[in-house]
């Protein structure tokens, strides 16, 4: 059974870079053209899509993040990662990694990590 | 960006009664070439990640009870719980996968 697990610092200082990794177990991230995705959720609020990467390295980002985000994939480690630069308190949230499935779930996030709380504070 | 609007924001339903959640998209999420609606529904309980309920607006994920149903097309969609159970207390989100940036509705909280 495929599982996703986020890891990284739970506290980041303002203006610094938030870096998270999602480790995938139970399946290879390049066994299919999965959409490997990062989504965040501020406390008590809704869900925001940050971006996605395909196993071939092609990435798409949410323009609302003003070019602060980079998503990368390491097929050898079966991981994908998020970098969010120049963070502020508004970036404090639970960050989820998620993955779409194979057809017919190829446009649906059917596997999620448990989420990791990242707080931006000095 | 496609704006997803859910209504109501919250819903109180008695056990065994029907719950209906609406989701409207600011533009159609129906892809004409394959006649599929790129609309998914999620359930989220406190401290948990979202759980996929439906893809293509009405295709039920395995393990989801059949008291849950998804319907609609184009810009208007509905999630219905036919007979609310205690374990259905959660926040429900719709999400469009028609184009990036992918966007979610604001969520509907269902309580008893």
Image: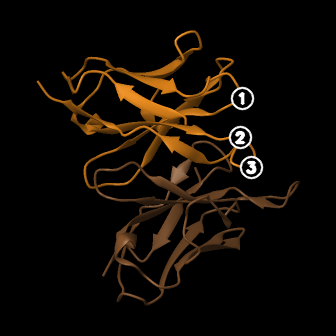
Q: In the image, what residue occupies the spot 29% across and 35% down? A: A91
- Left or right of residue A89: residue A40: right
Packing grade of label 2 (10 A; few <14, some 14-19, many >=20) is some
Q: Which chain comes out orange in the rendered image?
A: A
> According to the image, label 2 marks what residue?
A102
Q: What numbered label is drawn on residue A104?
A: 3
Which residue: 37% across, 54% down?
Answer: A46
Foreground residue among A16 and B62: B62
Q: Within the image, what quadrant is residue A9 found in?
A: top left
- Residue carrying label 1: A32
N-term mark: 1 or 3: 1
Q: Residues within 10 Å of mark 3 (few under 14, many from 20)?
A: few
The subunit carrying tag 2 is A
- The percent position of residue A22, horizontal first and vertical second, equals 44, 25
Q: Is residue A6 above or below residue A106?
A: above
Residue A27 against residue B27 in the figure, above or below: above
Report the residue at 21% width, 35% height from top.
Answer: A89
Q: Would you say the residues marked 1 and 2 are in contact, meaning their CB atoms lie under 8 Å apart?
A: yes
Q: Secondary structure at mark 2?
A: loop
Q: How is the image coloured?
A: by chain
Work out which residue is located at the far top of the displayed protein and give it: A76
> What color does chain B have in the rendering?
brown
Q: CA distance from mark 1 to mark 2?
A: 7 Å
């Amino acid at each position: 059974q495929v599982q996703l697990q986020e890891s990284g610092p739970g506290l980041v200082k303002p203006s610094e870079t938030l870096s998270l990794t999602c480790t995938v177990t139970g399946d290879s991230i390049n066994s299919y053209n999965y959409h490997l995705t990062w989504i965040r959720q501020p406390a008590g609020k809704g869900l925001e899509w940050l971006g996605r990467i395909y196993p071939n390295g092609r990435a798409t980002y949410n323009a609302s993040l003003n070019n602060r985000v980079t998503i990368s994939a390491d097929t050898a480690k079966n991981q994908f990662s998020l970098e969010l630069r120049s963070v502020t308190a508004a970036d404090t949230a639970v960050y989820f990694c998620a993955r779409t499935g194979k057809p017919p779930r190829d446009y649906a996030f059917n596997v999620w990590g448990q989420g990791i709380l990242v707080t931006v504070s000095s | 960006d496609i704006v997803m609007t859910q209504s109501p924001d919250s819903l109180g339903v008695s056990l065994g009664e029907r719950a209906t959640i609406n989701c409207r998209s600011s533009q159609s999420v129906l892809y004409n070439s394959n006649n599929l609606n790129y609309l998914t529904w999620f359930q989220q309980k406190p401290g948990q990640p979202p759980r996929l309920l439906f893809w293509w607006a009405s295709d039920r994920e395995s393990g989801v009870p059949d008291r849950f149903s998804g319907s609609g097309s184009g810009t208007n969609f509905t999630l219905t719980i036919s007979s609310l159970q205690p374990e259905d207390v959660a926040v429900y989100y719709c999400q469009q996968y028609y184009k990036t940036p992918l966007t979610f509705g604001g969520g509907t909280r269902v309580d008893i």
